[in-house]
Structure formats: structure tokens, C-alpha cells
Amino acid sequence: MENLIEIKAVRHSYRTASGPLPVLDGLEMSVPEGGFVAVVGPSGCGKSTLTRLVAGLLIPDHGEVYVHGTRITAPRSNVGMAFQNPVLLEWRTILQNVLLPLEIVPSKLSKAEGEERARRLLALVGLEGFENKRPSELSGGMKQRASLCRALIHSPEVLILDEPFGALDAFTREDLWQIMHRVKAEEPFTGVLITHDLRESIFLADQVVVLSGRPAKTQFVLDVPDTGPRTLDHLYTPEAAAMLNTLRHQIEIAQGRVPAGAAA
Amino acid sequence: MTGRQVYVPVLAVIVFLALWEALVWVMGWPNYKMASPSDLIPAYQKYWELFLVMGWQTLWRTVVGLLLAVVFGIALGMIMGFSRVMRDALYPLLVGFNAVPKATVVPIVALMFVGAHDFNTVLIAFMISFFPIAVSVSIGLSTLEPEYRDILRSLGASQATIFWKIALPKTLPEFFGALKVAVTLAFIGTNLMEIVSPHGRGLGALFDSGKTNSDYPLMFAVLIALAFLGIVLYYVVVALERIFAGWADRTA
């Protein structure tokens, strides 16, 4: 399978008042077409920087980022993004919010077709009947679902999710995990998910990348075996427990709490 | 607008006038100490033509000054909102300029542009009212969460698109808040010019002639007329706010 996203030997520093602050050093990652990779790592290790590199919002000091074989040097319209903060535009209805990318990206869809697609996506995430509501009338989980629809409306090749469920309560979060599986089945995409939640990473992704502490490099890669459609029950199997344990150890190493050799 | 939104404020005004009348009557004040609402009616009857002519002069000069303040304030706010360097450079100048009492600027302006009464009055109204607009627009733009920008930038949108689609509408509630303050300030500016440097135009001049002729009820009548104009203009801004930034109102 061809790799849709290819990150090669990326090094990046931010300029600060007290000199350059290296955030990424030796980052390697590849995501096959249709793959879904979760990125975990200690707080402030540069996970969000990684998403900005893939989106073309940031150009790395060294190394290369490729999407579909093209080296990324500027933002391209084939990316959809959703953040922890749903950033919906309060003066627009939910439907108008979802349609926003189509106003910017050159699209083959006519206005009616775009609207049709937006309504279908909203129904897919369970927001049927909320098309004409304002964001302020929606709960946090509903806003996040609308934000997801906006990220997908222009059929992007790459979906970047930067801790989209981080601010939600546990039940709403699990609800959204299941919705993500439904969306992926209907609207195939190649995904990069930044998360702090190890259960979320193994429930949603087919590969989990652990980044080391700052400056971050790829420390560990865990493949989540494909055992058919996943349900929440899968999180309570011995296999899941073993994966979570491995990841937890890797995070501890990344945090510098445990020397690398001590991990089982 | 519901019936309640009309009769509650009207009732409040009537209660206020009644209390005022009662206060003057109970204290037994002569009208040169404090005129009562009932003293004002003859003043309006006697000078109604002057009130119309001069009220209009005050109103249009205030509105023109305010419009200039809106245009200039938005432009300045945009420059300071988008550029950190410009913000650092302009803020002290702006605060210093705003700290200068405009009453002291009036004679300077009057000397600088001798005879250009309308221009001078508009200028003072403008100078006193652009500050809150510039500050609110600059704060609105500079506090835009980066995710908003990223959502559009990742799609390849230009800076201009980001401004029109997100930054501008998002700043509107702050802008209208500032505009409400600017409306009253602009009236103060117009009247400062009309009273401190009288040239026979506007309600300020009518006030001044009341003072010269010891016509105390006329002076109070002018104050009430000014308050009335202020209220009218304020509600014009409220109506515009409902149209352009009604989405920000969460009380409904």
C-alpha cells in the first residue's frame, strides 16, 4: 500500500526570547492511504506542531513532509482539521458552518449538492434536525460533531484531529469514538489523531505512534491488530489491556521517569 | 420589540420627571437654582423653532464626526490588531492623545481653522470618539483564537478571506459595544465646541445664550433636548447591532 503521508527526519525549532526551542528532532512517520494513526506522547512534546506540519501551516527547519507524494511547502486544500476547541462561527447556523470550506476550496459540487452532502454528514453524526440551530444552542459534544462534519465536507485526503475529544466528558467521548468508526466506514479518509487518551488511541487507530519528550522523535510504534469492527467491549479484553500497558510504559519512558531498558 | 420593551423605559422616564418635579416643589427651589420639568414646557413652546434648527445642527455634526470616527477607528484598530509592532508603537501615542482633555483642544482647533465652524465641531466630535472604537477593534482582532485562522489557512484561504469570513464578524459585538460609548462621547465633543467656542450654531450655542440672558429654564431645556438626541442615536446603534450582531445576544 502506498503511503499517503510521509514524514522524513523532521527537525523543527521555535524561536523564543531565550533562543531556539527545539520541539521535533528526528521525527519519522508514515501513514498508508486509508490508515488511521494516533500520536501520543508527553504534554508539550510537539504533537500539535506535527499536525501543523502535515497541514502545511508550518514548514519544518529540516526534513520533509510529503502528502500523496507532493512535498508540503504551503497549506493545501486537501486537508480537513478539527481541534479540541470546535471553533464554530457563532453567527452562522450549523449547516452554514459545515459548508464553510466549500466557500474557499474549489469544489466540483454545486451549491445544492454541497448542501445535500452537508445534511448527509450531519445525519451521519446524529445531528439531523440541528441544521438551522446556532452553535450556542448545541452541547459540547454536538459542537464537536459539527466541527467533524466541517472537516470532512470537502472530502479531504487527510483528516487531522488534534485532541478533538479532549474536553468532553467520558460518556460523550465514547459516544464520539463510535461515531468516528461510523464516519470512517461511510466517508473513508486517511487520519492523524493527536490524543492524550491511550484507550482512545487503540480504539480508533490502526497504529499508535509514541513520541519522546521534547525535542520529540518517534520513540515507539504499536500496530493495533485488525480484528473486525470494534466495539467498546474490545477495550476490556486482555489484548487491549496488554496494549495499553505497553503504551503506558512507553509514555513513562518518554516522560523520563523510567530508563528505556526497564520497559518489559 | 415587545410592548414591554416600549412601556417600561417610557414609564421610567415619566417616573424620573415626576420625582424631579416633586423635588423642586418640595425644596421650594427657584428656577435659577433648578428648573422643574413644568418650567421647561414654556421654554420649548417659546423657542421650538430654534430647538429644531439648532438640534439638527448638533445632530448632523455629531453623526458626521461619529462616522469619521468609525472609519478611522476601524482602520486604526485593524492596523493595531494585525501587527504587533504597530500595536506596540501606537498604543502609548493613542493613550496619550486620549488623556488630553478635549476642552483644552477646542481653543487650539478653533484658532487653527478660524471660521470653519462646522469642520471644527465635526473634528472635535471625531477626536473624542474614535478611541474606544480603535481599541475594541484591535482587541477583537488580536484575541482571535489561532484555531479560527488555522481552519481557513489550512484550506489555502488568503488573509483577506480570513478577515472577511471570520475576523470581521467575530469583532462586531465588541465594535458595537464601543460604538455605544462613542455615540455619547461624540455628543460631548460637539457640545464642547459649541459651548467653549461659540459661533451661534447648535444646541450648545442655545445653551450659551440661555446663560447670557439668565434664561435658566432654557438651559435646562437644552440639556434635556441633548439627552433626547443622545437616546435617539443610541437606539439607532442598538437597531444596527440587532441586524449585524444579533447572533451574539444570548438573552433571548
Image (cartoon, coloured by chain):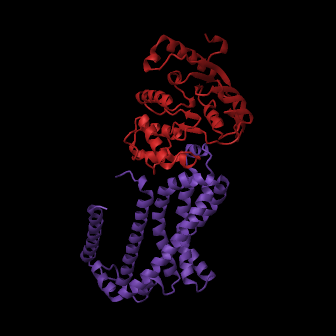
Chain colours: A red, B purple
A186 to B172, vertically: above or below: above
B134 vs A1, left or right, is left
Looking at the image, is B161 positioned above or below residue A229?
below
> Where in the figure is residue B228, as x and y percent of width and height?
37, 74
In percent of the image, x 49 and y 49: which residue is there?
A111
In front of the other: A51 or B58: A51
Q: Is residue A34 above or below residue A61?
A: above
Residue B94 locus on image (x, y percent): 61, 63
The image shows residue B70 at horizontal and vertical percentages of 53, 66
A25 left or right of A103 in image: right
Task: Looking at the picture, tell me which residue is in the foreground, B53 or B93.
Answer: B53
Q: Quadrant of residue B23?
A: bottom left
The residue closer to the viewer here, A66 or B194, is A66
Q: How many marks?
A: 0
Please tell me which residue is depicted at 66% across the width and 21% down the height of the picture: A219
- Residue B175, visible in the rendered structure: yes
Q: Residue at left 27%, top 80%? A: B38
Task: State the residue at coordinates (65%, 52%).
Answer: B84
Quadrant containing the N terminus of chain B is: bottom left
Residue B27 shown left or right of residue B80 in the figure: left
Instruction: Tell me where residue A26 appears, x and y as whole percent.
Output: 72, 26
Which one is nearer the viewer's eye here, B18 or B226? B226
Place residue A4 in its image quadrant.
Answer: top right
Q: Which of the 4 quarters of the picture holds residue B32? A: bottom left
Q: From where the camera sits, is residue A255 visible? A: no
